Amino acid sequence: MSSDALWWRVAWRNLWRNAHRTWITASGLAFGYFASIVLVGLTDGMNAELVENGTRLMVGQVQIHAGDYLPERNMHRTIGGYGGTDVESLLTRIEDHPDIEHATPRLFGGGLLSSGERTVAGLLLGVDAEREVHVSTLLATLDEGRLPRGGAFEVVIGQEMARQLEAGVGDEVVVVVPAADGSMGNDLFTVSGIFQTGTPGIDRDYAVLPLADLQSLMAMAPGRIHEIVTTVTRSRETPAIAASLAAALETTAPEDPEPLDVKPWTELRPELHEAVALMDSMSFVIVIIIFAMAVFGVANTMLIGTFERRREFAVIRALGTTGSSVSRTVVYEGVMLGAISLAAGALVTWPVMVWWHRTPPDLSRWLRGFEWTGVQWRPVLRVEYSVDAPVVTGVALFATAIFAAAYPAWRATRVPPADALADR
Amino acid sequence: MRRTFPAARTRRVLASAVLLLVSALWSPSPVQAQTAREILEQVDQLLRGESSRGRVTMSIATEHWARDLEMEVWSLGTEHSLVRVRSPAREAGTSTLKAGREVWNYLPRVDRTIKVPPAMMMGSWMGSHFTNDDLVRESSIVDDYDFEIAFEGARDGVEVWEFELIPKPDAPVVWGSVEYEVRKDDMMPTHVEYFDESGELVRTMVFSEYRRMDGRLVPARMDVVPADKPAERTTLVYHDLEFDVGLDESFFSLRNLRARR
């Protein structure tokens, strides 16, 4: 048996000399692990809720415009310039990117909607309904009626706009919009549905109609769109995905006359990005506190353990054991304690996380939803798995155990054999 | 998101048309040693109850398109006006009615009248560089502004007054100040400059081609140039103009707005 294996065995036996104490310490560490993982999971869950609710409704996670479209949103600045672009092939190229889930084209117009004596200013949004439903939840919030059919002069409007216009499903509204040729596009549309997103600005201002209908109303060719909105596979990595998509679009179509502007939601909704960063840093601080407490707990246990063994250390020192071997056995104890804690912690944490993720407690019986940073929140405590949190926390837990054993180990090497044996 | 609303543009044009009309009606009566308010009130008085009918071409040039609209314009004082597009054929019949502070548009394609909502009053009228608000404001110049003579004397060899119009504190006016230059000898306006609240020039209106129409001297041409886009402009040119054509308020009704004449 090598001497190292021997010291591992010695450490193992020492650990179980006081099994009670070891279990309590290990439980403390395991609970620290559990608490950190759940806390990080909850924070990630809230952040995911924040990002999804803040982007799923309208914004999407990556938006693509002509380079000079934002911030003025001039109606003439369509993707590909005045000539427009081959929308289908552009969408295909975008969806070919491995991190892009869905993409949908949009056209905007600012106009008037009028019904009877009532007239309101509204934002006209031309969409490809089949694609739009995969990207935004706007059309999924239809309260009444159904999606507008292309070529049938149908429009869906927000619930507040419907109220202001005193128009319901089946009613006619006049839509007036400035066209690209300077004329006033105007036509009669039928309200085919009414959406209710819960976001007042959207329910009041937006009227959604088929892309081709809005293009013809605005005297624009079918290749002219203002925006492509996409969802991505991992919303937290959107900036990197947007950058790689921008690079991919540049290489696949270098002949495009107009450079495309590819923006991640972190730039489109900076306040949302900041809210997520704030939540992350808060949970980081709490995790640090949890681990600081664990460090002192472990150090305390180990210190008591080494003080108890002063005489023992003195004897083996007197028998010729080197100081480094003595300290090694104490550090090994810390390593094994960490391993046991980690195993126990993972065993408890994993099923809880799985259960929590699958059936997030719905508190809506006690709490109402609220709005924060312009985003609607559901009173649901959801947790998200993260890949790095269990690993990072596990490594941190291990490091904590070893670090906490370092001081007692150093103390153990400093035991003067003669004094200790003489009980001085 | 900034919105560009066509209807709002329409209003602007209407407003300019109205302003043009007002300028056209500015009659050359000799005025001496009057205060700014007195001069402008006199003009205002002259216009009240006076009806007119005219034909005008509005040419709009923007960065992206250019177009000409032939229009017929009726007015009664400063409170009422009706503008009807005659060509191009695709838009013939499109009409705008101003009655007091309200602006209505008639769209022949859908056979509907639409009242311009308050949110759209700053929008462009008919795609021009006039706002709907211009149509409405013109009738309340005397009520909305304080006046003073900022300059009096010769400019480019012409004796002029330059009035400075400062909005009254509670007036619903978007401008920070307006400078209005009038030729002394015939009371003809020469140009108007509109400034925002920080004193930046927003747009300039220039009058020219002073001609006698139906016995009155009027500036037959007016150009509006936005200060931030000097290459763009809206030009109104009167081809004919008749005064005292015997209109009363009933002419400026929603029913008449819809009548396709």
Image (spheres, rainbow, N blue to C red):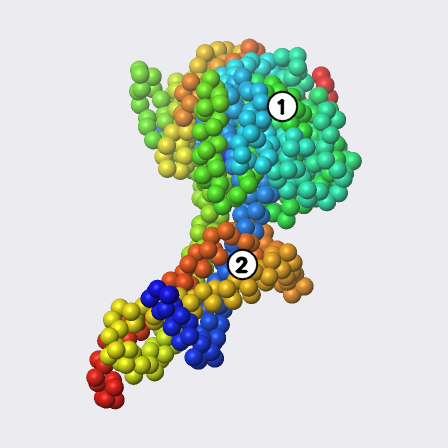
Q: Position of residue B234 (x, y in %)?
A: 49, 19
Q: Residue at x 62, y 60 (%)?
A: A355
Q: Nearer the viewer, residue A87 or A373?
A: A87
Give the class, few, some or many, for how many residues have Cα within 10 Å of label 1's Cα (few <14, many ≥20): many
Q: Position of residue A327 (x, y in %)?
A: 30, 70
Cα–Cα gap, marks 2 and 1: 44 Å
**Is residue A421 visible in the rendered structure shown here?**
yes
Mark on residue A215? Answer: 1
**Is residue A71 visible in the rendered structure shown here?**
no
Q: Is residue A172 above or below residue A377?
A: above
What is the quadrant of residue A243 in the picture? Answer: top left
- Callout 2: SS: helix
* Residue at the extreme right: A170
Q: Nearer the viewer, residue A119 or A137?
A: A137
Work out whether mark 2 precedes mark 1 in sequence or the reverse, and give the earlier one: 2
Identify which amino acid the numbered label 1 is placed on. Answer: Gln
Q: Position of residue A283 (x, y in %)?
A: 45, 60
- Number of callouts: 2
**Lateral position of residue A322 relative to residue A20, left or right:** left
Q: Which residue is mark 2?
A: A42
Identify which amino acid the numbered label 2 is placed on. Answer: Leu
Q: Nearer the viewer, residue A48 or B47?
A: A48
Front label number (2 vs 1):
2
What is the quadrant of residue A145 in the picture? Answer: top right
**Lateral position of residue B210 relative to residue A156, left or right:** left
Split into 4 quadrants, where in the image is the N terminus of chain A?
Answer: bottom left
**Lateral position of residue B103 relative to residue B34, left or right:** right
Chain hosting mark 2: A
Q: Position of residue B222 (x, y in %)?
A: 47, 17
Q: Residue at x 60, y 47 (%)?
A: A199
* Residue at the extreme front: A1
